Image (cartoon, rainbow, N blue to C red):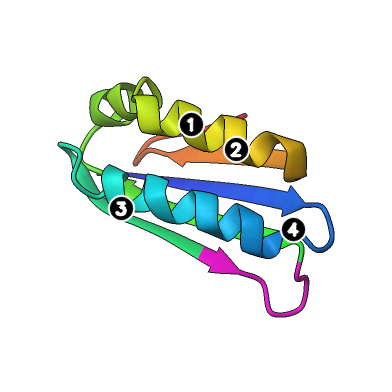
Amino acid sequence: MIYVVAKLTIKPGSLEAVSAAARTCIETTLKEAGCISYDLHASVSEPETLVFVERWETREHLTAHSKQPHLKVWREASEPFTVSRTIEIIHPERVETF
């Protein structure tokens, strides 16, 4: 199993728009092969900080996820509101950082 922790900093006042776009992506992603969980959390202390926490059976499942049309739609919808994004893919033996 691998974990993905994606931190997204968004523009002030854009939480509702970003959350609405994320909901559709999350619902569809949860149906993908290899997806164990896919959760979105909002920071209580930093309202412009969102954190996705994902669990996947394998890196191959995550790679397949990255090519899905609904993920492309999510990226395009969130792009105008995104200030910064970091992604960590946590394997048992290493961490990939983007």
- Mark 2–mark 3 Cα distance, whole angstroms, equals 16 Å
Residue identifier under label 2: 77
In magenta, the rendered stretch is 41-47
Q: Which mark is residue 93?
A: none
- One can see residue 54 in this view: no
Q: Which mark is residue 14?
A: 4
Are discs 2 and 1 less than 8 Å apart at CB? yes
Q: Earlier in the sequence, mark 2 or mark 4?
A: 4
Residue identifier under label 3: 27
Residue identifier under label 1: 73
Instruction: Tell me if 33 is positioned left or right of 65 in this view.
Output: left
Residue positioned 67% across, 49% down in the render: 8
- Mark 4–mark 3 Cα distance, whole angstroms, equals 20 Å
Instruction: Tell me if 86 is positioned left or right of 1 in this view.
Output: right
Residue positioned 43% across, 56% down in the render: 23
Residue positioned 75% across, 45% down in the render: 81
Question: Judging from the image, what secondary structure is the residue with disc 1 in?
Answer: helix
1 part of magenta stretch: no
Are discs 2 and 4 less than 8 Å apart at CB? no
Where residue 61 appears, x then y in whole percent? 24, 29
Q: Earlier in the sequence, mark 1 or mark 4?
A: 4
- Mark 2–mark 4 Cα distance, whole angstroms, equals 11 Å
Question: What's the amino acid at mark 3?
Answer: Glu
